[in-house]
Amino acid sequence: MRKMSCVVTLAFILLTGCNDQKIIEQLGIVSLISYDDISESEEHKMKVTAVIPDYSIEATSEQEILEAEASLMKEAEEKLANQTRQKLVNGQIRSVIFGEDLASKGIKDIIQAMEREQEIGSRVKAMVAEGEAVAILKSTGVENIGDYMEKMIKKAAEEYLVPNSDIHIFYRDLLDDGIDPVTPLIGLTEGRANLKGTALFKDDRYVGSLNSELSRIFLTLYGKVNSSELTVKMPDGEHMRYINFNYNESDRDVKVKKKGKDITGIEIKIDLKGSVLEDTKEGVISSPEESKKIEKLTEDYITQNGEKVLSILKENRTDSLGLKQYVRNSLSFKEWKALDKDSILQTTPITLSVDVKVKDTGMMQ
């Protein structure tokens, strides 16, 4: 009897596994979706593209790409569903990519619709593509672009190369009158998708960007960084000196200076502690004097590029750093409501102070 029970149990498990396989083959599980603007007039029209991994036994490729033109997200979903024998499900969407033309016009409606849809998780990564987003989905060299983009963005965010921005964070910052949203910026290099930097938004409109080098600096100004690195490029005498500075302690402090009820300035103070892993200067030895020199070079590098970041933010009239949150906290509710918020970064002097401490100069030549 016991032997028979084991046989029946094993048969049930095998049958269940077969049924699960059939169920998966019947589902079109969307892993990545993109939105591009195709309006030729004021009429709102977009191209929606979805990537569906193909789990069927007879599959000739690892993914299927569906496209539809629509004015609403739900309308696009219906048109996409009509192109496949499978039932489309959105529960496994990991990334959403907006083409720059569409993002420039505003993406609030799409983000809001995704945030409200229970089937879609709020941790879906949001990003902007240079040019058309559909080009990323059709890029070469990757068999499963949905899986590739999810892992690439996750790794880059963990290493503080790009901001960590999902649709929940984007929508939260969009509703906050003290900060503007940011997302990773991606593009194509020789037909392959890769990171380009940070996309800057004014409210829900894409207005500008920071390249990869400035994105690293931006993230040190943005908030606490657990662990990252910088390649410092600064003149040292007659030659350029390159230093790899790996920092595992960082802190940001923002102070609002006031005179009475007037805002007279904003000070951003950055503290970094880390190690030098590589230096192009020959004959470098570990000494207090050399450590001080490296600290000064690194401070100057961060300060100069940090001022470039602030200049780009001012130029695009966006507060991606959330400095207005600190201004808001220094005022009464009535004072804040009466303030011309859009002009704060334009009219208020912003100073940047950087303090770097080198804990180790065990460098490689």
Image (spheres, helix red, strand yellow):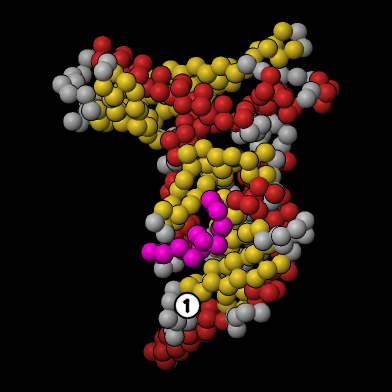
User: Nearest the camera: 191 or 123?
Assistant: 191
Element marked by disc 1: loop
Side of 346 relative to 229 (left or right): right
User: Nearest the camera: 297 or 156?
Assistant: 297
Spot occupied by residue 148 in the image (x, y as percentages of width and height)? 44, 60
Please, what is the dominant secondary structure of the magenta stretch? loop
Q: Is residue 149 above or below residue 263?
A: below
Query: Is residue 5 visible in the rendered structure shown here?
Result: no
Side of 188 relative to 67 (left or right): left
Q: Which residue is mark 1?
A: 55
Quarter where residue 91 is shown: bottom right
Identify which residue is drawn at 59% across, 66% down: 49
Spot occupied by residue 313 in the image (x, y as percentages of width and height)? 60, 31
Spot occupied by residue 326 in the image (x, y as percentages of width and height)? 66, 24
Side of 143 relative to 289 (left or right): right
Identify which residue is drawn at 42% across, 42% down: 159
Identify which residue is drawn at 67% across, 38% down: 202
Magenta-highlighted residues: 129-141
Identify which residue is drawn at 47% across, 34% down: 214
